[in-house]
Image (spheres, grey):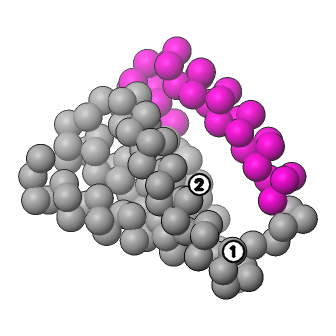
Amino acid sequence: MSVLSILAGLVCGVLSGFGIGGGSLLLIYMTELGGVEQAAAQGINLLYFLPTSSAALIFHFKNGLVEKKALLWAALPGMALSALGALAATNLASALLRRLFGIFCVFVGVKMFFKK
């Protein structure tokens, strides 16, 4: 494990805590610089998400930033669609996953750019 990998993990963890999408950045780092296959990087990213999101959720709860009424309506479909996405990811070619993720990143970036 290189120093760069450790720094990337730390930076992405901090960004995840702020809700900036550190996991997405970590996924890009692993596939483009780390030489990790897309499907494996997505699995690592899911494991990485568990502790970082749990820590962020604790702090957001403490600061009153969690809308409890919306939590159930967001969590249940999120879990179901995550399982469906994982199933799809295991059955798609790595090159296709890479392209789809790239399209998704561009879409989100354009949407954020034009958001008021």
Is disc 1 surrounded by few (<14), some (14 to 19) or many (20+) residues within 10 Å? Answer: few
Query: Is 66 placed left or right of 42 in the picture?
Result: right
Write down the region rendered in magenta: 71-100
Question: Gap between marks 1 and 2, in whole Å?
Answer: 30 Å
Tell me the amino acid under the disc marked 1: Phe
* Residue ranking furthest to the top: 91
Where's residue 9, x and y in %? 29, 58
Helix or strand or loop: what does disc 2 sit on?
helix
Q: Earlier in the sequence, mark 1 or mark 2?
A: 1
Residue at point 75%, 72% (across, down): 66
Tell me the amino acid under the disc marked 2: Phe
Q: Is residue 32 above or below residue 69?
A: above
Q: Is residue 20 above or below residue 78?
A: below
Helix or strand or loop: what does disc 1 sit on?
helix
84 part of magenta stretch: yes
Q: Which mark is residue 107?
A: 2
Q: Which mark is residue 61?
A: 1
